[in-house]
Image (cartoon, rainbow, N blue to C red):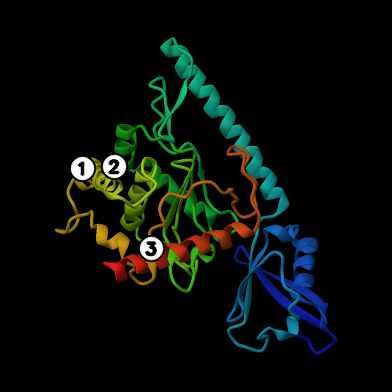
Amino acid sequence: MSSDPDLTLTIHHQSKPHTLTLPTTSTLQDLSTQIAATLNIPPETQKLLIAPKPGIQKYPFPTTPLTALPLTSPKFKITLLGTATKEIQTLHAQSEETARRTSARASALAAAAGQKPVRTRSHGIHTLSDASSSYTFQRLLPLSYLPRPDRSLEFLKRLRDDPGIRAAMAKHRFSVPLLTEMDPAEHTTSESRTLGLNRNKGEVIELRLRTDAYDGYRDYRTIRKTLCHELAHCVHSEHDRAFWDLTAQIEREVERADWKHGGQKLTGQDFYVPDDWEVERERAVVDECGWTGGEFVLGGLKEDEIGRTAGAQEAEDRRDVLARAAEERMRKKRED
């Protein structure tokens, strides 16, 4: 901070520092406006991770004075998570091009088979006709506003191309329009950490790939196990016996078809352990059943292919659902 009436702050965005100068009377709202003018990142897509306190700040930003922040702390740092308008437009263009190519490829396969492409659904599962062998994730989307989105994309590709996952999805005829990563900051509360979500029985699957501090990636096999769990939600929304039986079946199929490891487990333990999912371990839970309804938003981006838009309230709504589900589990345990 300079000694003159102005306040100089360093904002870190995508591993690059940006210096902004504002009057000492400025607030977080003023800082957001200055960021929008300087970096061309709309306020509604901005998230400010302020360390050590007050932590993550989202749009609409409070009128907290900048002088109230721990500016003199040696650990003070402001990290900006947000996507520039130009990048958003590029992603939309890529989405439209991907949709066009997918449609053209499906039409070509249908023409070769002598029949029209037919998209069918059974019990809410997104499946394709036998004219297409695309029982896979039709689109992969990392969070571009987080560091190194290229690494996240490679991680998503590894999951998509995993021999075990491909075999299981082909057997159950699962075709998921979008596989994306989850923002840890939006899915972490003081009580729990959500590891995955399945929206509307296979419309979108989100996975927590990164560590909470965004400084690395979680264990691949653990994430793959979470993916098996979310694929089972394409059929069953609730965590009932039928759901766990299907989860166990998918996990066994993934293990058997994993030719990279010779179809053998890396440990002597069973791969499927239901208690691991039901009981919070280090505040981690897989999910709170299949996510139905609601609206889908990714870093403030409107997903044209899915046709959804969303406001900032969605994350708060989901945390309420998680809290109510946790309370319900505790009540059932007390009754038992």
Please provide percent x and percent y for residue 240.
Answer: 31, 50
Q: Mark 1 points at which residue?
A: 256
Q: Which tag, 2 or 3, sits closer to the chain's start? A: 2
Quadrant, the C terminus: bottom left
Question: Does residue 149 sit above or below 201 in this rendering?
Answer: below
Quick one: label 2, few (<14), some, or many (20+) residues within 10 Å?
Answer: many
Query: What residue is at 79 percent from the left and 66 percent from the top?
Result: 33
Residue at the spot x=36%, y=68% of the render? 331
Amino acid under label 1? Arg
Number of other residues with Cα within 10 Å of mark 3, as a class: few under 14, some 14 to 19, many 20 or more: many
Q: Is residue 245 above or below residue 104?
A: below
Q: Position of residue 120 (x, y in %)?
A: 45, 26
Residue 20, image quadrant = bottom right
Q: 145 or 231: which is nearer to us?
A: 231
Nearest to the observer: residue 200 or residue 210: 200
Q: Residues within 10 Å of mark 1 (few under 14, many from 20)?
A: some
Q: How far apart are marks 3 and 1 (CA)?
A: 26 Å
Labels 2 & 1 near each other (Cβ < 8 A): yes
Mark nearer the N terminus (3 vs 1): 1
Q: Which quadrant of the rendered structure holds the N terminus? A: bottom right
